[in-house]
Amino acid sequence: MADRLTGTRGFRRARPSLGPGCSFVLPATRASPSVPAAHTGISLAATRYSDPQDLGLVAAKSVRYPAAVQTPPTRREHEALKAIYRATTDGGVALTGDLAHALGLTPGTITATVKHLADRELVLHTPYRGVELTDAGRRAAVRAIRRHRIVERFLSDMLGYPWVDADRLAGTFEYELPAEVEERLFVALHRPQSCPHGFPIPAAEVDTVPLLPPLTSLEPGDTAVVAVPGSTEADVVAFLETLGLRPGVVVEVTERHPFDGPVVLRVDGTDRTVSHKLAQQIFVNVTAATT
């Protein structure tokens, strides 16, 4: 016997609860719905209807996107965003092969990661050309860099970890940190201007990170504050330590030899000589030395 409510056979009178913001239409015909049920986030598994399309579900106010789009970026995706940002500061594109090498991932894994970021509209990926950040992706990358450097400062200043360990440890939990806690840490640390490695902490809600030039860019007579990346190899860090070259140390260039020759620095009143290759791995903050 036909159900008097729907005019179809086998349908129950009980109407399923669709949640706030959604309504449903029960048509007399089996016309296709305006919005597929899969795009509304509504599960029909609990109902006993023979065909979900008979419900003709329509979102009354807004369409809820698939869960994969709503969830925040994963730790790997955050790291990929930061790597893409660093690789494209000159305005170019990042190659997936270079990203895989920088992050220690297989080509297949980095390709899948880039695809997920593209689905979130955080990157643009052109096959055989490269990857670049969208405006939203650039803001997300800078926020990730800011958070990382704040957490590094927390580990170093409040917990007493050496600066050489801060980069590794920060990456283990920074993505679980709520934004509110991040901001309170920043305030509790007296709003630091740089991370323990000497690199600037970008302001909130910006889409660029101030870049530091390498030591090789300085001329004799120039003074600057040293910054050493957290990715620097341990043996290089140990050698720099013997020269007194560590983050936050003020140096003055006294001599530069031509043809990519060594650079002579005055460190704590002592002249130190470093090769051109090593000087390229040391970065400097000229502004910090004059303030």
Image (tube, rainbow, N blue to C red):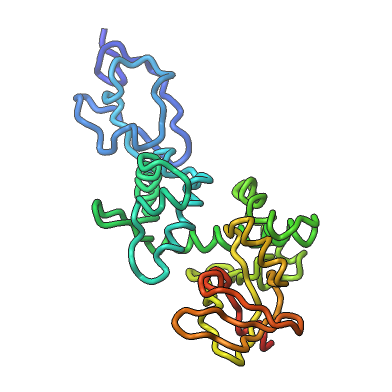
Q: Where does residue 3 sit, x and y in percent of width and height? A: 30, 14
Q: Residue at x 24, y 53 (%)?
A: 128
Q: Quadrant of the N terminus?
A: top left
Q: Is residue 31 left or right of residue 211?
A: left
* Residue 282 against residue 52 in the figure, above or below: below
Q: Is residue 109 visible?
A: yes
Q: Is residue 202 left or right of residue 207?
A: right
Q: Where does residue 41 sit, x and y in percent of width and height? A: 41, 35
Seen from the viewer's position, the closer of residues 276 and 188 is 276
Instruction: Work out which residue is located at the far top of the displayed protein and give it.
Output: 1
Q: Where does residue 242 sit, x and y in percent of width and height? A: 72, 67
Q: Is residue 61 visible?
A: no
* Residue 252 against residue 1 in the figure, above or below: below
Q: Quadrant of the C terminus?
A: bottom right
Quadrant location of residue 227?
A: bottom right
Q: Residue at x 31, y 20 (%)?
A: 5
Q: Residue at x 66, y 67 (%)?
A: 240
Instruction: Work out which residue is located at the far bottom of the displayed protein and give it.
Output: 221
Q: Residue at x 50, y 79 (%)?
A: 261
